[in-house]
Image (cartoon, rainbow, N blue to C red):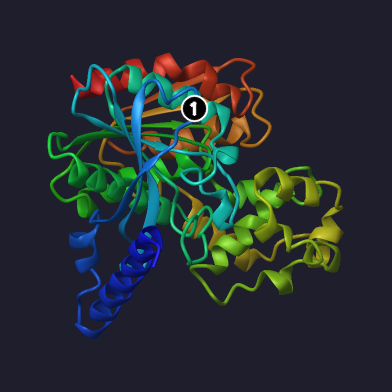
Amino acid sequence: MNPALRRNVLASILIVLLAVSATLVPGKPARAAVLAGAVLTSAAAALPAELAPLANGKRVSYVSSNVSGLPITATGLILTPKTNKKNRTVVWGHGTTGLADQCAPSASQAVFWPEARAAIAVLLQRGWTVAAPDYPGLGTLQAHPYLVGASAGRSMIDSVKAARNLDSALSTQYVIDGHSQGGQGALFANELAPSYDGALTLRGVSSIAPVSNADLFAPLIPGTPAQGYLVMALFGLQAVDPTVNPNTLLAAPARQRTGVLQSGCLNEILAAYESLTASELLVGGALPPSVITKLSRYANPAQKAPSAPILLIQGTADEAVPYVITAGPLLTQLTAYNQPVQFVELEGATHDGAVFQSTTLVADWIAGRFT
């Protein structure tokens, strides 16, 4: 058997055994948190041209857990600086790539977005090891719980554990830096950390244009060019709540396009759905209130107290995440807790442009958190 295939088979068998043991022993799903971060496979990874001179990369699969606390396999990259290594870890949480396995950035540079490369390059130049998780379901057999923030948050924290299992010189201190879907996941990780990260010490979270307030946001999407995001969100919700059936919510023209969710990634999905009217997207042209409530439950950060300081960044010309939602309700929600929140408004910055414009700002803030 091919060595890489054999490693993948063994990893899958181990995860099955862990899941079975967790379900057979009463009260033991929490054991996944103890196992989390165990590295199942590790192989040298080819990095984008912007990063190859700066780091050595490994593509890893590792143990994480789902929102029910059961063990799962997650994948991602661990990037180790070639020079000036500081033995601190920064998690990079990428923006939306899609739902299918080919949309895992660790396996496909086509969805290793330019803004992600720019952000990671500056982190590596500061000497920090970068853990870049794909998020559960991207690159593995399970469905991707898209915009289920606690799912992405777990994989982020567990990627730090995986990095430390590969490199024992790494400190327990870490910071999370995320954009869009990754910015949302970073905020959830901030809430999860005290009960989930074990011996690690979260020093801060940088969140750029995070998804939030689905109850305000989602009803505005039908009939707009961004409605492919909503279709993905419905299937992401189904991954954690089987009572949600996207095929009963989507109108016939939208159902006829769902094949793109497996054949393509973000750009193909957006293109497939952008021209539909609201009534061509959804039965009745709108989401049922019950679905909006479920989206809010799983997608809205700031429902619990954060555990570390937050840098919140938002461009005023963001075409994907409305400025008014981040600067309004989300900022109000986050500042109601006792962790400091620094809000930075980037005048004229688009969704991806906010990442490019803030790379140095974010790195300086992280350096302050590690000091």
Q: Is residue 56 left or right of residue 230?
A: left
Secondary structure category for the residue under label 1 = helix
Q: Which residue is mark 1?
A: 117
**Quadrant (top left, top right, bottom left, bottom right) of the C terminus:** top left
Examine the rendering and report whether any part of residue 24 can be seen.
yes
* Residue closer to the observer: 233 or 302: 233
Q: Is residue 212 left or right of residue 369?
A: right
Q: Residue furthest bottom?
A: 24
**Quadrant (top left, top right, bottom left, bottom right) of the N terminus:** bottom left
Could you tell me residue 293's position as x and y percent? 56, 62
What residue type is disc 1 on?
Arg
* Residue closer to the observer: 220 or 329: 220
* Residue at image coords 84%, 68%: 252
* Residue at image coords 64%, 24%: 350
* Residue at image coords 79%, 44%: 224
**Badge 1 local density, few (<14 within 10 Å), some, or many (20+)?**
some
* Residue at image coords 58%, 56%: 99
Q: Quadrant of residue 169?
A: top left
Could you tell me residue 14's position as x and y percent? 28, 71
Q: Is residue 178 above or below residue 197?
A: above
Number of numbered discs: 1
Q: Is residue 146 above or below residue 28?
A: above
Q: Is residue 212 left or right of residue 307?
A: right
* Residue closer to the observer: 339 or 162: 162
Q: Quadrant of residue 131?
A: top left
Could you tell me residue 164's position as x and y percent? 19, 42
Examine the rendering and report whether any part of residue 305 can be seen.
no
Could you tell me residue 316's position as x and y percent? 62, 22
